[in-house]
Amino acid sequence: MRYHTVIIGAGMSGLAAGIRLAYYEKPVCILERHTTIGGLNSFYRLRGRNYDVGLHAVTNYAPPGTRRGPLAKLLKQLRLRWDDFDLSPQCGSSVVFPGHRIPFDNDFDRFCDNVCDEFPQQADGFRRLVATIDAFDELNLEQEPQSARAVLAEHVSDPMLIDMLLCPLMFYGSAIPHDMDFSQFCIMFKSVFVQGFGRPYRGVRQILKTLVRHYRELGGELKLRHGVREIRVDNGRAVGVVLDDGTEIEAENVLSSAGHAETCRLADQAPPPAPVQAGELSFNEAIFVLDRQPSDLGHDETIVFYNNRNEFEYASPEDPCDVRSGIICSPNNFRYDDDLRLEDGYIRITALANPDYWMNLPDEEYYPAKEAWCERMLLSALEHIPDIRPHIVDTDVFTPRTIRRFTGHDRGAVYGAPKKILTGSTHVDGLYLCGTDQGFLGIIGSMLSGITMANNHLLR
């Protein structure tokens, strides 16, 4: 069969693009190398328990019935209902640096007041920054890159406030060491601070299973264990793919969520005119299962973004893991309905990791190293949460090596290449990018990436 579009990868962006195309009755097939869906945001079962991977929270939260904003747009484009995602808002989060704490929830005005209360001498400049962000059109796909740090410094003079504003946004979306593109900064600022966090009670599987069910109801094909070995190019145009087993599939278009460098490598019959820089930023994450709710121990915050030194360093560390900063998240601490309560308690701790160290470690050293650095991550996080160690009943840890295995991203780069291709176009006709290296960020942003690329390139 010849398809209108073959999509590489059954992550959020690929599934959303597939739904959009299938809705307009385009023959579409999603190919996924692994046995499960989700890519960077997936789920698994281990020792009798369900785990989410990737998802801490869904950004761009909006209450049911909201008519404007990214989540409302997404649901309208996919013809889904608010109940399909069943999001519950966060309890409240914070950014914590030495001597300073900025709490925030899904009330943006309150966040602005908290920033101004914590940094009163920066209040006027911060308000001007907010106005600049509000006026910026981050959805303009023709934007020229500019440094977020440079723009922030035009409005705010306190380097710690600049770092505290950047910290959560970098951790949740920056592929650039020490900085962000200002367009990406605006996307994440609005996603995290203006709109805020939510989570389905059943976690990421709620979203993924909804997408797959809807996609298949519309007639889309999903093939698991069908890895793509090559993108076939004829006279400068993508004409299909070759699978790992040698099977050829013809298509008028190919939409890839594999990453820019990785996609170019698959289309090596037509190399790009200039080398494509791959990403380098990756993470270790430890998931701790507790015998009680975190709130029972005195921890009721949803997410804590912490930095234990005066300056925030966002880069691939020389050590195997940078435990001086990180993210603490509890899936328990969302405002679920009164009769809903996660059976186990969970604490997830995430920290920057050195990809080369974890990729090159022999197996006999890899697993002991995971345990050792897990303990160090926990000790660092205990400066900000109660001591959970007596209540830990199970632990799982993943590293850049795990991320590379399940996503195919070079070096386990979570946010892909530092240079984004906002238009989604590549050097090959009929070959387009969606997802991480296109440039829309977060769970909702990733789905909007797939929708936008389908609308702009494949439905015209």
Image (cartoon, grey):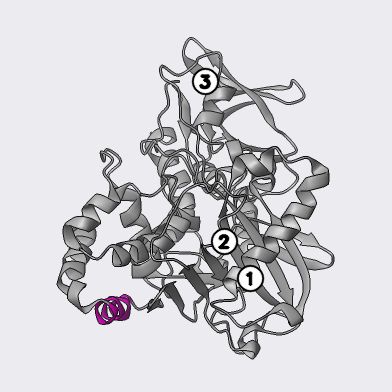
Residue 62 drawn in magenta:
no
Q: Which residue is mark 1?
A: 379
Q: For the residues marked 1 and 2, what is the alpha-carbon distance in whole angstroms? A: 9 Å
Q: Residues within 10 Å of mark 3 (few under 14, many from 20)?
A: many
> Is 4 displayed left or right of 245 in the figure?
left
> Is 108 displayed left or right of 296 in the figure?
left
**Quadrant of the frame with the N terminus:** top right
Q: Which residue is mark 2?
A: 323
Q: Residue at x 52, y 62 (%)?
A: 324
For the record, the magenta segment spans 108-118
Residue 113 drawn in magenta:
yes
Q: Residue at x 39, y 49 (%)?
A: 178
Mark 3 and mark 1 lie on one chain; the one further toward the N terminus is 3
Residue 26 coordinates in the image, percent (x, y): 53, 36
Q: Evaluate if marks 1 and 2 touch, with contact meaning CB atoms under 8 Å apart.
A: yes
Mark 1 and mark 2 lie on one chain; the one further toward the N terminus is 2
